[in-house]
Image (spheres, grey):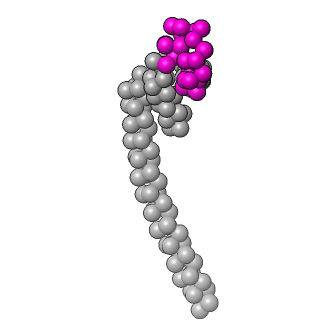
Amino acid sequence: MQELSATMEQIHTVKKYRSYYKEYKANPSDKTFFEEYKSQIKLYETALSELKKSYSKLPNSKDILDKLDKLQEKKNTLMQEYSSSKSDMDELYKIRKNYGIYMGKEIER
């Protein structure tokens, strides 16, 4: 889930700073433009290189959101199962404890 969140953040960065990068690539000899927007261009390049490591082409935000939704649903289902199992386990521990107390008194008689 963290990986998908990081991917979404990188996609956002790429989309946000794409115009600066295109302007820079259109006129790479313009040093003043590069110096002024150096941080945005570097962020774009870094985010794009990270995305290219994981994906052959820029992933679709909608697909990633769908994956996140499915993972969230799965997490919720598993948490409900865990809660139910924990409740059952607590009940069994209580029964075991009571049984041990009862059997301990029976042995003393």
Residue 85, compared with residue 50, is above or below; it is below
**Place of residue 97 in the rendered image (x, y in percent of width and height, measured from the top left):** 55, 75
**Place of residue 73 in the rendered image (x, y in percent of width and height, measured from the top left):** 39, 41
Nearest the viewer among 51 and 101 is 51
From the viewer's perspective, is 69 left or right of 37?
A: left
Question: Where are the magenta residues, as a range?
Answer: 20-41
In this view, the residue farthest toward the bottom is 109
Residue 2, compared with residue 20, is above or below; it is below
Tell me the chief SS of the magenta region: helix
Quarter occupied by the C terminus: bottom right
Is residue 65 in the magenta section? no
Residue 9, compared with residue 49, is above or below; it is below
From the viewer's perspective, is 69 left or right of 1?
A: left
Residue 25, compared with residue 9, is above or below; it is above
Query: Visible in this render: residue 18?
Result: yes
Residue appearing at x 41%, y 22% in the figure: 60
Residue appearing at x 54%, y 72% in the figure: 96
**Place of residue 102 in the rendered image (x, y in percent of width and height, measured from the top left):** 53, 82
Query: Visible in this render: residue 51?
Result: no
Residue 49 falls in image quadrant: top right
Residue appearing at x 49%, y 67% in the figure: 90
**Place of residue 19 in the rendered image (x, y in percent of width and height, measured from the top left):** 45, 18
Residue appearing at x 45%, y 63% in the figure: 87
Nearest the viewer among 78 and 18 is 18
Is residue 26 in the magenta section? yes
Nearest the viewer among 67 and 13 is 13
